[in-house]
Amino acid sequence: MTPVRDGLLHIVRPGALTTVQDAGRPGWAHLGVGRAGALDAPAARLANRLMGNPPGAALLETTVTGCAVRPGRTVVAVVGGAGSRVTVDGRPVAWGAPVRVPAGAVLDVGPALNGVRGYLAFAGGLEPEPVLGSRSADLLSGLGPAPLAAGDTLPLGEPAGDPPHDEGPTPWPGAPAELVLPLHLGPRHAWFTAAALRTLTTAAYRVSPHSNRIGLRTEGPALERARDGELPSEGMVLGAVQVPPDGRPVVFLNDHPTTGGYPVVGVVPETALAGAAQAVPGTRVRFSVRA
């Protein structure tokens, strides 16, 4: 067993994909650096609020299979986002509410029972070295801490004040049964036929299992082009709905590239993207065009 050091969080089981995330690093796209940050931003902010942390404090984002960690000192933690079974040294504890974890105990976040991404926050936050003002891992650029592996350690921050307390039942949003994404058409919707635009807003798309932090991929009918050829690379924004050669829309999420050459049929507002973080493969996706 790796020796447990005071002030560090030790990764016992990293799960399928566990990363450090915060509010991200917006404002660097002109240098080719994406935003990153927690995909389910409301869940991350709520987890930090329960810990008495600033809204953008660094925490862990798990994917589907959870993770297990061992703190080197006694901490208060909360697990939110995707619902899961949570234990401390094998003893069941509360999900979605503050939990005391003694020094050297194993806090285990089990597989997601609903949703995709869980958030594990600690009073005082996590303090790996920031890169361009953020501690977030960016899977596309490789900036920030690498995805966690067994045996890794992360510095624990110091709580700012009194230990957080249980505020009672917390209304965590659940995974969507249907993902409804408002869509502002453009800038390249004229590259698609009128029939394709009708298909986009009426067809039964579903979340593809190939979705990730870069983009939510869809399964469903292909969108027919009105013109051939490709665009020169142009800037891409969070929520852009890009249509690659197979014709199936891809909704760009936090680790998206900052440029791309496939046409963008529309853009989903950032405020509507939290559900995309928790939509399990097979979830129905419906695009709703807004003026």
Image (spheres, rainbow, N blue to C red):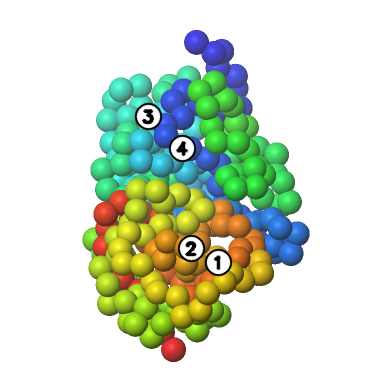
Which one is nearer the viewer's eye here, 18 or 287? Answer: 287
Which comes before the other along the chain, label 1 or label 2? 2
Under tag 4, what secondary structure?
loop
Under tag 1, what secondary structure?
loop
Residue 33 horizontal/vertical position (percent): 69, 55
Residue 165 horizontal/vertical position (percent): 41, 45
Q: Which mark is residue 262?
A: 1
Which comes before the other along the chain, label 3 or label 1? 3
Residue shown at the point (46%, 23%) measured from the top left: 12
Identify the amino acid type marked 2: Pro
Question: Would you identify the image quadrant in which residue 279 lies?
Answer: bottom left
Residue shown at the point (59%, 69%) measured from the top left: 230
**Label 3 near label 4: C-beta < 8 Å?**
no
Residue 291 horizontal/vertical position (percent): 44, 89
Number of residues whose C-alpha sits closer than 10 Å to that of mark 1, classed few (under 14), some (14–19) or many (20 or more)? some
Which comes before the other along the chain, label 1 or label 4? 4
Residue that sits furthest to the top in the current view: 1
Which comes before the other along the chain, label 2 or label 4? 4
